[in-house]
Image (cartoon, rainbow, N blue to C red):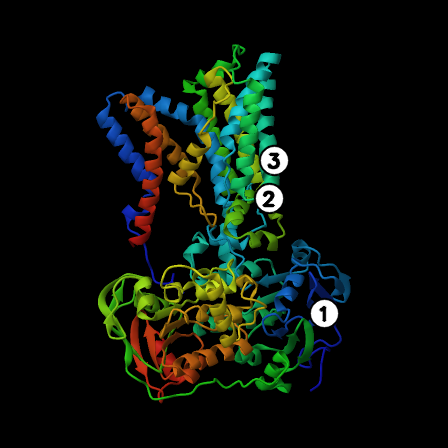
């Protein structure tokens, strides 16, 4: 017995590491650039973070099951090509959207089947799908962008409803749904159990494999929705559109305080993690720093987030 | 000795069929027979004790009862009517609830969600949970067992005993009519156990049938209405407590006669090898001073939560010490567990699965792990030499394993504990700290563990032993320190070492 002696953390230790880092980033960039702390710029950060958030939310679930989905960037890429090709061929945005969703779901189910039913390690399974999706994307596009989109597409990314940009509405809805799913439904409790204690599911008569497969399917589905948004943003399908996005998504989840074991996850932390990465990129753009440096700084962010958590863990 | 499957004499209504009856249950796993033709019957308001060594088939039987494992053969009768238990839902419908020793709790869900895990209170929006109802119901169930705790606390924040209470609440919340408990007191202090027993008696009065697995003879005789002994997957005998002595039960369990007395050869202690002076740590212990001499087994007792484990960790350097000093073989210990190991100290933790063993690795790998530096001073690993050393330890400690290549996970609790102890032998450890060395271990293996500890001490080692079982402390130890609320409340010499004295010192004023 070790947990019986009371160790209540102080107020500073209870502030999540990611929140502290977010505050530091905002203060630093606000001081360094007069353009940073303006409403249009901050709204821009949210809009630019929208696709990443759509990937990072379900990635939180995947990581809570002690898994990983590194295929989402490539699935996103393939999704934009599906959306663009369908839009070009049919002129219908609805069909284009369905094509993107279908692509995402197909890979989600495929990953879920590999991981949950064939017991492949998640890293290996999704690395395989990553290559398949990226390869298909290059083959289908011949390495070229697909352009000539119908006029309505652009409005999905740059339009507003009641003065609020559409991408912001989409991520607010996406977060609300995901939050509800994790914290307000039985399925959410199963996600905690998949990483925390799979035996609990078996004993309660709930099929763990089916639930695990569903988590990967959800990840694919959200990549499909992200594909629509990204295609609208580029007004084209591009064979490298989503490259590296899986790493940003995993980084956001890690920065947000979700541990990689025992089902210890925090969904809103992921949102903060996405914003931290978004603000970092935006702030460095404003200061005209080279974008290659941004990638390195995201790495520092991940390490700093884990260090803060580790230091907090030691101090009572 | 008569074998009785019939209804016990002391229950009230005659010739009513049992609440649940198992007939001829058999189950094999890839060629290994786990259960062979087992019969078992429980009546309402009966506490049916189930005894058997690890590997006797108790856990398989429990899994059969809760629908997690389907038997190859056999029938279930509920109130005399044939029923099927093919799934967890079937078992739940029949009012069967099982409390496992390996907790079925989810660490990062709160208490309320864990209690009602897998069941739903439908919320207003389809597919959602009614959280207000959830917390109300959780509160009601927790009140029922007299457990005052915030149901919003996450399970990973709780201690083992508290988790056990949540586990019980979870079972009771299903309106269980048949409650199966696997060593429920293994993680509890005596006071907590008493609370549990009172609750069990209330359930019994409420006509709940209880199947209770235990390794503790005192419990078997204090609680049991009938006792069933399993061995090698077979039901050996079912008897009334008045008909059997503890020695007989042990003989039935192991199939041979086992000396129940604790194997201990007391000798005159040698020089002091562990000296702890005024140690305090952030984990809540303060001003701890104690000694261990060569050839001694020194007990460290007190209620669960009094800081015993924290003392062990502070001495070993696993937690930071804020004041005081620890001398090992006359030298001041500086640094962490690594330094302690080099000085010849070994800590055998309570949760051997998470702290003491690399479960996925082989018996051989685990055995040489702690002594790598000493076995291979040139830092080159020779698999053959490592294997020879491991085999030598397996033989010396009589670890029941087919080969040193087997995964530790496949061993019984007693054998795993021997591996944890054995891995310190190549490391040259001569000061051992045991934290609950016999938790979850059956009687046959317990005696072997104590024989092993005795052997270590005979060979000149010193031992500090934490145990919640007072009889262990009383029979095995040269002396004992009793802890209360993070401090040492007193020291008991061999002559003064009685259960009453331990209790008197350890109880809160």
**Is any atom of residue B287 visible in this view?**
no
Q: Is residue B89 left or right of residue A307?
A: right
Residue shown at 54% from the left, 22% from the top: A138
Q: Residues within 10 Å of mark 1 (few under 14, many from 20)?
A: some
Q: Which residue is mark 2?
A: A116
Q: Quadrant of residue B21?
A: bottom right
User: Residue B311, percent across and down?
Assistant: 32, 69
Q: CA distance from mark 1 to mark 3?
A: 42 Å
User: Residue A89, percent across and down?
Assistant: 61, 13
Are marks 1 and 2 in one subunit? Answer: no
Q: Which residue is mark 1?
A: B36
Q: Secondary structure at mark 1?
A: strand
Chain bearing mark 3: A
Residue shown at 35% from the left, 87% from the top: B496
Q: Which residue is mark 3?
A: A110
Q: Quadrant of the N terminus of chain A?
A: bottom left
Front residue of B254 and B105: B254
């Amino acid at each position: 017995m070790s947990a019986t002696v009371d160790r209540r953390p102080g107020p500073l230790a209870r502030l999540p590491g990611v929140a502290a880092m977010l505050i530091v980033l905002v203060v630093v960039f606000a001081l360094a650039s007069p353009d940073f702390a303006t409403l249009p710029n901050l709204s821009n950060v949210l809009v630019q973070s929208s696709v990443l958030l759509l990937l990072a939310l379900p990635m939180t679930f995947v990581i809570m099951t002690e898994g990983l989905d590194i295929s989402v960037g490539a699935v996103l890429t393939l999704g934009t090509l599906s959306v663009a090709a369908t839009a070009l061929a049919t002129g219908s945005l609805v069909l284009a959207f369905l094509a993107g969703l279908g692509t995402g779901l197909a890979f989600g189910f495929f990953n879920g089947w590999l991981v949950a039913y064939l017991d492949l390690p998640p890293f290996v399974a999704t690395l395989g799908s990553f290559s398949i999706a990226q390869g298909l994307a290059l083959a289908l596009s011949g390495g070229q962008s697909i352009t000539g989109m119908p006029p309505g597409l652009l409005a999905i990314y740059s339009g507003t409803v009641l003065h609020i940009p559409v991408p912001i509405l989409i991520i607010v809805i996406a977060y609300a749904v995901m939050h509800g799913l994790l914290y307000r439904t039985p399925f959410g409790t199963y996600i905690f159990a998949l990483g925390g204690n799979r035996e609990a599911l078996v004993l309660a008569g709930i099929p763990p494999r089916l639930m695990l497969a569903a988590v990967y399917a959800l990840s694919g589905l959200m990549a499909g929705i992200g594909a629509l948004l990204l295609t609208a943003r580029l007004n084209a399908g591009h064979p490298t559109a989503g490259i590296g996005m899986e790493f940003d998504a995993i980084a956001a989840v890690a920065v947000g305080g979700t541990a990689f074991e025992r089902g210890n996850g925090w969904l809103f932390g992921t949102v903060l993690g996405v914003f931290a990465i978004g603000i970092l990129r935006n702030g460095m753009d404003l200061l005209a720093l080279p974008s290659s440096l941004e990638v390195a700084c995201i790495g520092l962010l991940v390490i700093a987030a884990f260090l803060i958590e580790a230091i907090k863990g030691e101090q009572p | 000795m008569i074998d009785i499957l019939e209804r016990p004499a002391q229950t009230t209504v005659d010739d009513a069929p049992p609440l649940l009856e198992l007939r001829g249950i058999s189950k094999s796993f890839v060629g290994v027979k786990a259960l062979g033709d087992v019969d078992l019957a429980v009546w309402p308001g009966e506490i049916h004790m189930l005894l058997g060594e690890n590997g006797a088939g108790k856990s398989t039987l429990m899994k059969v009862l809760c629908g997690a494992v389907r038997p190859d053969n056999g029938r279930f009768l509920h109130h005399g009517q044939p029923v099927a238990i093919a799934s967890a839902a079937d078992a739940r419908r029949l009012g069967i609830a099982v409390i496992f020793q390996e907790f079925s709790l989810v660490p990062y869900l709160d208490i309320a969600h864990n209690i009602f895990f897998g069941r739903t209170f439908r919320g207003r929006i389809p597919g959602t949970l009614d959280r207000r109802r959830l917390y109300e119901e959780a509160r009601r169930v927790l009140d029922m067992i007299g457990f005052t705790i915030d149901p919003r606390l996450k399970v990973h924040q709780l201690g083992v005993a508290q988790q056990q209470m949540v586990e019980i609440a979870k079972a009771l919340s299903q309106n269980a009519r048949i409650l199966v408990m696997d060593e429920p007191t293994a993680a509890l202090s005596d006071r907590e156990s008493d609370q549990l027993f009172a609750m069990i008696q209330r359930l019994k009065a409420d006509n709940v049938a209880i199947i209770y697995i235990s390794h503790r003879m005192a419990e078997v005789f204090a609680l049991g209405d009938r006792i069933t002994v399993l061995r090698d997957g077979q039901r050996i005998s079912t008897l009334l407590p008045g008909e059997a002595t503890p020695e007989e039960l042990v003989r039935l369990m192991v199939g041979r006669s086992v000396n129940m007395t604790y194997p201990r050869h007391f000798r005159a202690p040698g020089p002091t090898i562990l000296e702890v002076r005024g140690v305090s740590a952030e984990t809540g212990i303060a001003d701890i001073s104690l000694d261990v001499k060569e050839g001694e087994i020194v007990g460290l007792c007190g209620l669960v939560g009094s800081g015993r484990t924290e003392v062990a960790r502070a001495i070993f350097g696993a937690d930071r010490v804020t004041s005081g000093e620890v001398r090992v073989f006359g030298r001041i210990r500086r640094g962490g567990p690594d330094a302690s190991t080099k000085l010849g100290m070994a800590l055998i933790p309570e949760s051997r699965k998470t702290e003491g063993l690399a479960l996925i690795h082989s018996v051989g790998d685990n055995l040489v792990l702690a002594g790598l530096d000493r076995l291979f001073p040139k830092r080159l690993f020779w698999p053959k030499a490592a294997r020879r050393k491991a085999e030598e330890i397996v033989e010396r400690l009589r670890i029941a394993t087919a080969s040193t290549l087997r995964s530790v996970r496949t061993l019984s609790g007693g054998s795993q504990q021997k591996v944890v102890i054995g891995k310190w032998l190549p490391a040259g450890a001569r000061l051992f700290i045991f934290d609950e060395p016999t938790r979850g271990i059956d009687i046959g293996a317990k005696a072997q563990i104590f024989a092993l500890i005795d052997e270590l001490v005979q060979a000149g080692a010193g031992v500090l032993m934490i145990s919640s079982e007072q009889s262990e402390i009383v029979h095995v130890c040269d002396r004992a320190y009793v802890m209360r609320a993070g401090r040492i409340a007193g020291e008991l010499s061999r002559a003064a070492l009685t259960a009453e004295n331990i209790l008197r010192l350890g109880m809160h004023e």
